[in-house]
Image (spheres, helix red, strand yellow):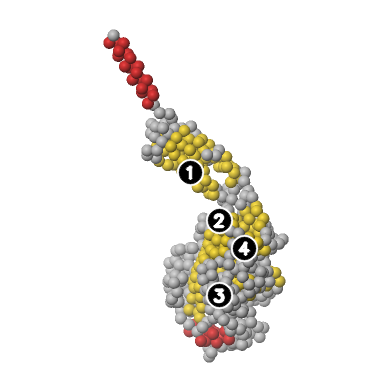
Amino acid sequence: MLTVTLLSVVFLYGCKKEEDVQPAPTVAWNQTTIEAAAGQQITIGASVSAPAGLKTVTVTRNGTAFDSKAYTTETTAAYSVSYTVPKTQPLGSQLVFTIVAQDNMSRLSQTSTLVVTITPKPVITVTGSITTNTTWTNDKIYKLSSFVRVGADQTITGSPSATAVLTIQPGTIILGERSTHGTLIVQRGSRLMAEGTADAPIIFTSEREPGLREPGDWGGVVLCGRSTFNQDGWGELEGNYGAFAGGGPSPVLADNSGTLRYVRIEYAGYSLSPNAEINGLTLGAVGSGTTLEYIQVSYSGDDAFEWFGGTVNSKYLVAYRSVDDDFDTDNGYTGYSQFGLGIRGSMLADGSGSNGFESDNNASGSSALPVTAGVFANYSLIGPKADANTVINVQFYNGIHLRRNTRLKVYNTFVTGYPNGLYVDPADAGVTLTNALNGTLLLNGVVLAGIQNWGSNGFGLGAATAPRGYPVRNATLSATETPYNIGLQTPTQWFLSQTGNKTLADNLTTGVNPANIVTGRPSLTVGTAGTLLSGSATLPNNAYLTTAAYIGAFGATTDWTSSWTEFNPQVQAYR
């Protein structure tokens, strides 16, 4: 009897232990296949169950460790992670993700497999006007056909009949159609929210394949605002393509046309007619409520950046190998811009003459208000003449060209490699010279440096007409080269009498070597021994400006162009 009882207890105990044993963990991807494009951000997720308690989830990508996560008391979990497909991932290739769960009894689940296949992004052609709030996502490519307008604004002096906000996700690619000169125009009252990131910039570029792209393949990006414009308060931007700018008699100084941050604009700048062009980035009476930061314009067929009036501020701008001017101000621009870089190609120049800075009050040089008096600080303008033997286009003129009654203010800026470092143009009956004399046109902390022995070693070696190098131009650019003065001083004497200004025949001590900039990704910081690290002038007292103790766009170590810029866009396979 005792034996039977003991056997019954053992049997019952064994059955209870068997009932207490929990199932092994399980895991399954939410999707087993995904199609995605190179550079696209996707979310991969899985459902996990571990009745005995979840310990870890381990994920591999193509057989190598990708991610792992530890758990404590959970018996179920929803695993999820955002993943950006590498931009270099070939079309048709596959990324294989596996996921395994382990429970607190050290048991492993079966492996679940997810396959991501790399496919081209669909191309969406955009035409006409966008009159409702719209978002462009980075899983598609958008092609601008002809003039694409955000909002509707039909008359110079009228009010927009429709406004809209166009939002563009980080990493989105926008192509300009070549046959129709695709252009994006943000009309007054509307906004463009193009906020990329350093790792995923927004790219506007040519629709043509690598190796075939040219400056002027498409129009460009145009922002129109309701701030100041010294042509009766408002006007149509040059080219007559319906880009109306200005707030008339009641300008909105803090008008907001949106945000451009971490944006690249490549191969834009189309000429509609002689002296009527769309630039890489055109800014018409844009207000200070607009944010412009970390923008690169490359291979523009006209100017890289042009401000027609307005009060907008900007930082971290790059003009790379444009055809006409790098940074052009007109029609009463009065904002602040700090940290900018201009780099020229040796043969890409415009028949009108190519400059780093070009500044006018307006086309006639009148005294219309507000007068162009923008502030530019900490710019580096690297001209085409990398060394004594570099052949340059004879249409290159000036690092800084000030004319037509401008009252521009330039601080702590470095210029090298141009035939003329500075030209204060007397062609407006001396009005610009008067501005320089009375201090309303101002240059402080400006360093003009040439190649070694600037001006005496064949500055335009190899060109039919050799441009001669002058740090400051003391005579007109006309064939007769007529000397002129600013007051009782030559332009050189006037320039050197201003606070912190210098001319250097040799740029090798500055820490900036143009020979290291002409190809590939440039080396831009000046090291710890460069002479540009000292001697900066005091900036105006304005909250937008950042205190920087150096001259030019870069200090000893920090390169703010890293990761988001591209200095060889011709080879990039955008898709």
Q: Residues within 10 Å of mark 4 (few under 14, many from 20)?
A: many
At label 3, the amino acid type is Pro
Q: Which circle marks residue 226 in the picture?
A: none
Residue 211 in the image: state x and y as whole percent.
Answer: 66, 57
**Residue beneath label 1, please?**
80
Q: How crowded is mark 3: few (under 14 residues within 10 Å), some or many (20 or more)?
A: some
Q: Distance from label 2 to label 1 (Cα)?
A: 21 Å
Front residue (pair 260, 66): 260
Front residue (pair 34, 483): 34
In the image, what residue occupies the spot 48% across and 63% down?
Answer: 559
In the image, what residue occupies the spot 52% across and 73% down?
Answer: 253
Q: Are the residues at dot 2 and dot 1 in contact (C-beta closer than 8 Å)?
A: no
Kindly state the secondary structure of the residue where label 3 is placed: loop
At label 4, the amino acid type is Val
At label 2, the amino acid type is Gln
**Residue beneath label 4, please?**
150
Work out whether 81 lies above or below 450: above
Q: Would you say residue 110 is visible in this rendering?
A: yes
> Which circle, 3 or 1, is nearer the viewer?
3
**Residue beneath label 3, please?**
251
Chain-order first, disc 3 or disc 1: 1
Residue 408 in the image: state x and y as whole percent.
Answer: 53, 78
Chain-order first, disc 4 or disc 2: 4
**Residue beneath label 2, please?**
169
Chain-order first, disc 2 or disc 1: 1
Front residue (pair 474, 201): 201
Q: Are the residues at dot 3 and dot 1 in contact (C-beta closer than 8 Å)?
A: no
Residue 2 in the image: state x and y as whole percent.
Answer: 27, 10
At label 1, the amino acid type is Ser
